[in-house]
Amino acid sequence: MVASPAETDPAADEQFRADVRGWLEEHLTGDFAELRGKGGPGREHEAHEARVEWDRHLARHGWTCIGWPEEHGGRGLSLDHQVIFHEEYARANAPARTNHLGEELLGPTLIAFGTPEQQERFLPRIRAVKEFWCQGYSEPGAGSDLANVTTRARPEADEWVIDGQKVWTSFAHQADWCFVLARTEPGSERHRGLSYLLVRMDQPGVEVRPIVQLTGTSEFNEVFFSGALTTVDMVVGGEGNGWKVAMATLGFERGVSTLGQQVGFQRELDALLEVARANGTYDDPVLRDRLARAQVELEVIRLNALRTLAEEQGPQQASISKLLWARWHRTLGELAMQVRGPDSLTTGPGYDLDEWQRLFLFTRADTIYGGSDEIQRNVLAERVLGLPKEPR
Ligand SMILES: Cc1cc2nc3c(=O)[nH]c(=O)nc-3n(C[C@H](O)[C@H](O)[C@H](O)COP(=O)(O)OP(=O)(O)OC[C@H]3O[C@@H](n4cnc5c(N)ncnc54)[C@H](O)[C@@H]3O)c2cc1C
């Protein structure tokens, strides 16, 4: 969630940066020290329970939901300070957060569209990292073309009865609740007649089947709804307004936390440079050229992010930023394989991948999720450059 940018005050920014850095140094100690660098894409299985504890520790000290308005329990921090927090968090190599979907996607959506009862019921438990969420949008026939959603919900007494299938549902196996895009108006088409429902996962009508990924881990799932129930008051933004609410959630998805990610990218590149120096590939002029290019491109991503901060958000910033970082990160995974040479082709016993192999395999997904590269280019072509729409 992005609070409105405050007047810039470099001294206050530096003080805030020092506070965050100091707090992390003081608290990422003891048992928590072992969590440094744990978790993240392709490695979500690492120390999950301990990372939840760390997140709850952050919550107790007011470091979750820092951009939410104060009346909803957040800190109402300015955009600048949120970015500083995420930069320092990445710099400290603090563990990957476990409640991203609740904090960054559903929470801001409920703040914008939820009823006071929904806000009161759900926001405190997201902030305290007590309830986990998953995002039930994609279906076998509705990914890039999300308006094709066929999961349906019909009213019965004071409940909605939900039938259908979702797919690629990240963290569904750990989630308590799912925000589900479902067709509530029979016979409706495309973006009309959809509603945004909040559905409890732990019930007989919901079945979660993990999907094993190239990394050997299962971070996403198929989710089957067969007569799943939720009460009538669990519609966000009103019946039939699901498309508008779902799009707003997508807007929050590439929120400010992703602006801190380039610090994490720099750490990965630095570590790869170490590998290259150690195994001699740094002296190969072709590979050295590619490593230098990666550094230059990362600087471009950083400058683009700063420009994004300075401008009003529009579709172009989100799409350009996604295109830049997704391709950069996927290329880094490929570069890591080249730097490591034949070592990258073998695994430990039982498909025991190392961090570079995981990076290579998981970054294949970067150009797909959150809107594929092709879809970002369509957005730029049609909505920003005004080129003719592609035939449907
Ligand atoms: C790691 C990961 C996590 C995910 N987590 C979630 C989640 O938690 N919840 C959720 O709901 N979804 C999730 N997704 C799903 C994700 O949103 C979809 O994979 C994505 O929207 C693409 O949809 P699709 O897989 O159905 O591919 P398709 O839409 O079938 O696309 C297949 C290919 O065709 C291209 N294509 C499609 N349409 C066009 C077009 N009009 N013009 C040009 N090219 C086109 C695409 O770019 C892609 O290359 C996740 C995906 C991944 C990889």
Image: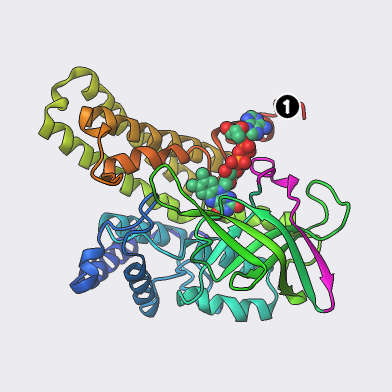
Q: For ligand 1, give the image quadrant.
A: top right
Q: Is residue 310 magenta?
A: no
Q: Position of residue 127 (x, y in %)?
A: 48, 74
Toward the right, the furthest residue is 187
Which quadrant holds residue 274?
Answer: top left
- Give above or below for 60 relative to 235: below
* Residue 379 visible to the viewer: no
Residue for point 63% across, 49% down: 138
Q: Is residue 150 magenta?
A: yes
Q: Position of residue 43 (x, y in %)?
A: 35, 53
Residue for point 74% across, 45% down: 148
Q: Is residue 351 left or right of residue 108?
A: left
Residue for point 38% across, 80% down: 60
* Residue 115 visible to the viewer: yes
Q: Is mark 1 within 8 Å of ligand 1?
A: yes
Residue toward you, 96 or 1: 96
Which quadrant holds residue 159?
Answer: bottom right
Q: Quadrant of the C terminus?
A: top right
The magenta-colored residue range is: 140-157
Residue type at mark 1: give it: Glu
Disc 1: which residue? 390
